[in-house]
Image (cartoon, coloured by chain):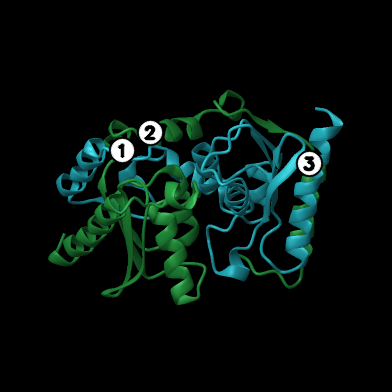
Chain colours: A green, B cyan
Amino acid sequence: MTEREHQFMQAAIDLARQGMQGGKGGPFGCVIVKGNEIVGKGCNAVTSTNDPTAHAEVVAIRDACLHLQVHQLAGCELYTSCEPCPMCMGAIYWARPDKVFFGGTRTDASAAGFDDSFIYEELKAPVAERKIPLLNIDREEAVKLFAEWIAKPDKISY
Amino acid sequence: MTEREHQFMQAAIDLARQGMQGGKGGPFGCVIVKGNEIVGKGCNAVTSTNDPTAHAEVVAIRDACLHLQVHQLAGCELYTSCEPCPMCMGAIYWARPDKVFFGGTRTDASAAGFDDSFIYEELKAPVAERKIPLLNIDREEAVKLFAEWIAKPDKISY
């Protein structure tokens, strides 16, 4: 790693600390970088905004996409103070930045009382064995949507 | 399943169809139910809002939490037209509804061109083998945040 990467990681850590101290939510921060410019940033704001999806990475991805007016982040790097949870990791795969840097690990997060490791294990478990019951109904009716999507002439894929 | 569950699933499918036809995004819809009332709803709006996190489930969870002024959805059921992707499944674990009903499967989604199965496989892969490089730096500096969080007297856990 060069000084550049350490500086952007420090920016993510600083955001995490400010957010935590300001009562916004948990101790997590994230910056998204294009070239040498920060184009999106966020800190955890779950409890202050009543939004369980307001993790630092999700907030930063939304911020960067709004700023750049894109729905994918090719050419960008993401720096987050902690290994992304499955929700944030999923968001990262949809946003497709080039590279992700993280500070703490999922184990560090779990040791501090966050559910990251539990959720990783749940996602590996068969659908029938999940802690939150996950039930399949009306598949036949639902899959018609996909046939309609495939046939739609003016769709925008993502 | 009773007629009740089929009706709420149909509401999710209807939202998916309306969203797709209205050019909002992909063919996905979701409703969140408390008792017999829909307290949150959403359709995919990724491409129309430049927000890669605007999947139906995430939109519906944010909508329900805003409506109920809570950051967790105990006592609620979530109905989604397709098996949630890892991002949405993660969001569901953070929001903690009592139960989830889905229509199409991740395989159906993949067959229609969506990355769900790919992302599920990636999340199971070791960090060092991911398609989007995931690099750990400055862990020592980052974990200080967790010690500060644990020591914080007025924190709101989630």
Q: Are marks 2 and 1 in contact (CB under 8 Å)?
A: yes
The residue positioned 49% from the left and 39% from the top of the image is B94
Q: Which mark is residue B8?
A: 3
Which residue sits furthest front? B154
**Which subunit holds the residue at mark 2?**
A
- The quadrant where residue A158 appears: bottom right
Q: Amino acid at mark 1?
A: Ala
Query: Can residue A20 be seen at all in this image of the molecule?
Result: yes
Question: Which residue bears the numbered disc 2?
Answer: A117
The residue positioned 25% from the left and 53% from the top of the image is A17
N-terminal label among 2 and 1: 1
**Which subunit holds the residue at mark 1?**
A
Is B112 or B39 nearer to us in this picture? Answer: B39
Q: Amino acid at mark 2?
A: Ser
Is B62 or B151 nearer to us in this picture? Answer: B151
Q: Amino acid at mark 3?
A: Phe
Q: CA distance from mark 1 to mark 3?
A: 36 Å
Q: CA distance from mark 2 to mark 3?
A: 32 Å
Question: Which of the two marks, 2 or 3, is nearer to us in this view?
Answer: 3
Give how far across and how far down residue A125 sits, in percent. 51, 28
Q: Which mark is residue A109?
A: 1
